[in-house]
Amino acid sequence: MGNLHSDHPPELLVGPETGDDAAVWQIDDHRALVSTADFITPVVDDARTWGRVAAANSVSDVYAMGGRPLFALNLVGWNRDELPTELLGDLLAGGQDVATAAGFVIVGGHTIDDPEPKYGMAVTGEVDPARVLTNAGLRPGQDLILTKPLGVGVLTTAIKAGEATAEQIDGAVESMTRLNDVAARVALAAGATGCTDVTGFGLLGHLGRMAIESEVVATIEFDAIPFLSGAADLASDGVMPGGSVRNLEWGVEYLDSGSHDDVHQLLIADAQTSGGLIFGIDPGETSAALAELSATGHHAACIGKTSAGSARLLLH
């Protein structure tokens, strides 16, 4: 896809080169626009809940850059021959729920006929150009903070197979519909220099890309990683999305897994939908950041550290 990248004017602060979550375009010394788009297929049976998950997933990229959303356009693929219009109304109502909670406006959108339904948003936000958080911003000697548990990919796979309990479904939905707005605010207040959200490429893929772009070693303490209830047991029983397997195949070249088995490696590669943020901060800021995240209902943790060296991930 490199042949599609044109020359970049100086106003383009963040483009496609570093694999960041969104593009950033500077307007003046104090303002920059953040632009992103994302959509997903259904991850739960209830249309309104799916709409909430998809919208939270789409707007997350703005938060991951340190920005705040302003407005969005709905992106819909809908099978008109198989699915009623009323169900589409429920889906869009879920998106509106998230827009209202996040304080941005849905100003229109586009729908196409599609045999497999899809929903998401193109979101425009704003950010201070001096405080943009990127993949390349990690520095040696930082703590790595993860703001949501992993395991969404495992649990949504179990949901589709009818193997998830009601408690596990509720846990996955609560995690996927939680906005990353507070997490982004905490990251900025703690002086974060690098940040991304953990979505389709899993912790392995997203943190691995950060390590590469930031030219640091990221050491992960597996026992410190929070997982959604039931995810580890289901993974041990072989419940794992194909995307997570592909993530591990892609990331194995820069992963030093130590003595950890395939299940542990797949869990850190688990493909997330609307996952949390991971960011790097000075260790002196960690306790306060985790306390604020806990006080606002997040199941966050310090899962590792960065150090100088050849860019890679170490799993301890």
Image (cartoon, rainbow, N blue to C red):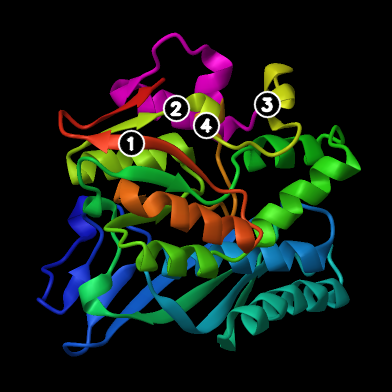
Q: Amino acid at mark 1?
A: Lys
The residue pinned by badge 4 equals 224
The residue pinned by badge 1 equals 305
- Quick one: SS at disc 2? loop
Percent x, y of residue 38: 51, 63
Q: Main secondary structure of the magenta part?
A: helix
- Quick one: SS at disc 3? helix
Q: Amino acid at mark 2?
A: Glu
Where on the picture, by quarter, is residue 307? top left
Which comes before the other along the chain, label 1 or label 2? 2
Q: Are marks 1 and 2 in contact (CB under 8 Å)?
A: no
Q: CA distance from mark 3 to mark 1?
A: 23 Å
Percent x, y of residue 35: 38, 75
Q: CA distance from mark 3 to mark 4?
A: 14 Å
Give the residues in magenta: 240-266
Q: Amino acid at mark 4?
A: Ala
The residue pinned by badge 2 equals 221
Q: Are marks 4 and 2 in contact (CB under 8 Å)?
A: yes
Residue 119 showing in the rendered view = no
Percent x, y of residue 285: 36, 54
Which comes before the other along the chain, label 3 or label 1? 3
Q: Residue at x 52, y 70 (%)?
A: 181
Q: Are marks 4 and 1 in contact (CB under 8 Å)?
A: no
Q: CA distance from mark 1 to mark 2?
A: 9 Å
What crowding class fits label 3: few (fewer than 14 Cα within 10 Å), some (14-19), or many (20 or more)?
some
